[in-house]
């Protein structure tokens, strides 16, 4: 009798353990998602943009009042700064943030917006002394912020500061930097990007109007090359046009190759992390991968900061139009109150 009771108890313990394991396995993905989401939103501490620098009025509730309408910042936006770093052929340097794009994922609307930031934009950049001590903040080309970092991660942090300040203190939840040399690996990941060339790229043997699937080497040149020695002002604008085209088609190729299979999409993201530097945790990356999979991205979802070029002391300077930027911010990041 006692033996039967012991056997029954063992069975109950085994069943309970199995049930517990099943609950853990079922709950674990949701726990990772919740952890990633929580860490992302808490990383900015409730920060919202400040559009008063563009002459807009902000009421006591933090809403922007413009044209008789009230706008509230959409806190469902998760903003990730992507930095393309040009450190090719240079030793002992972190290079410059030569390509800058703020990717905003809205978890409620399942949308993705990309804002391309001109590397020549004149923006607040922290300057440090020889000993590494902070000296001041100067308005210089945004690309320089990354190069002032002690290392890659420090460069990411400094660039986040610069882009946030340039875009009226937009909260930035994380950062990913990729060296230009690694674009070939990104191209290989999706099996090459097929496009119609929007201009000649001599080093890649590409002519405007060519319809081709880029080899890994061609992709690197197509995204990075610019005629920096040209007497023309604003040569980076042409490169940004190619970058916008490539990013859009690369994202579409990524989704087409991996479809809605989250596990395969996560494997793709792991491949990206292998060639990138990021301050995002694994749970945050998983959350972003899932949210990215839910969203579509089209040509009109990629924006450029409004402004115009000038040449100062032989250098191109892109001056952002703060009024137009504020209007663009309202369109992308805010909701109109009814």
Image: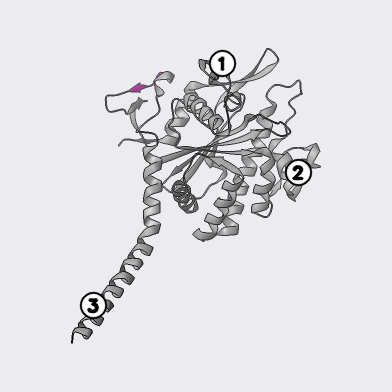
Q: Badge 3: how crowded within 10 Å, few (<14), some, or many (20+)?
A: few
Magenta segment range?
Answer: 55-59
Q: To which residue does mark 3 refer?
A: 9
Task: Give the residue at x 45% y 34%.
Answer: 172
Left or right of 179 on screen, residue 170: left
The front one of 149 and 65 is 149
Left or right relative to 205: residue 24: left
Which type of secondary structure does the marked residue at label 3 adopt?
helix
- Is residue 112 within the magenta segment? no
Q: Which residue is mark 1?
A: 129
Q: Residues within 10 Å of mark 2 (few under 14, many from 20)?
A: few
Does any portion of residue 75 appear in the rendered image?
Answer: no
- Between disc 2 and disc 3, whose residue precedes? 3
Mark 1 or 2: in front is 1
Q: Nearer the viewer, mark 2 or mark 3?
A: 3
- Magenta-highlighted stretch: main secondary structure? loop
Locate residue 110, reporting x and y percent: 43, 49
| Spot occupied by residue 241 in the image (x, y as percentages of width and height) | 65, 36
Looking at the rendered image, the disc whose residue lies closer to the viewer, 3 or 1, is 3
Which of disc 2 and disc 1 is earlier in sequence? 1
Mark 2, residue position = 209
């Amino acid at each position: 009798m006692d033996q039967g009771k012991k056997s029954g108890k063992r069975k109950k313990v085994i069943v309970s353990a199995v049930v517990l394991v099943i609950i853990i396995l079922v709950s674990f993905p949701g726990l990772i998602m919740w952890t990633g989401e929580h860490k992302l939103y808490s990383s900015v501490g409730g920060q919202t943009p400040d559009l008063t620098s563009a002459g807009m009025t902000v009421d006591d509730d933090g809403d922007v009042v413009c044209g008789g309408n009230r706008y509230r910042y959409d806190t469902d936006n998760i903003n990730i700064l992507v930095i393309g770093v040009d450190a090719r052929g240079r030793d002992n340097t972190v290079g410059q943030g030569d390509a800058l794009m703020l990717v905003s994922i809205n978890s409620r609307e399942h949308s993705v917006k990309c804002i391309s930031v001109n590397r020549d934009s004149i923006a607040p950049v922290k300057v440090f002394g020889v000993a590494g001590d902070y000296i001041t903040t100067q308005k210089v080309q945004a690309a320089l912020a990354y190069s002032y970092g002690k290392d890659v991660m420090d460069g990411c942090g400094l660039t986040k500061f610069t882009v946030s300040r340039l875009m009226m203190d937009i909260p930035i939840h994380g950062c990913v930097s990729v060296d230009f040399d690694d674009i070939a690996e990104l191209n290989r990941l999706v099996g090459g990007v097929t496009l119609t060339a929007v201009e000649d790229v001599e080093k890649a043997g590409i002519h405007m109007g060519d319809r081709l699937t880029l080899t890994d080497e061609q992709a690197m040149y197509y995204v990075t090359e610019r005629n920096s020695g040209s007497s023309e002002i604003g040569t980076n604008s042409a490169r940004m046009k190619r970058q916008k085209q490539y990013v859009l088609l690369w994202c579409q190729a990524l989704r087409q190759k991996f479809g809605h299979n989250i596990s395969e999409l996560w494997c793709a993201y792991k491949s990206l992390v292998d060639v990138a530097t990021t301050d995002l945790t694994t749970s945050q990356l998983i959350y972003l991968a899932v949210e990215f999979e839910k969203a579509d991205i089209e040509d009109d979802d990629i924006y450029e900061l409004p402004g115009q070029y000038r040449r100062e002391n032989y250098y191109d300077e892109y001056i952002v139009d703060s009024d137009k930027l504020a209007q663009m911010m309202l369109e992308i990041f805010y909701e109109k109150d009814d």
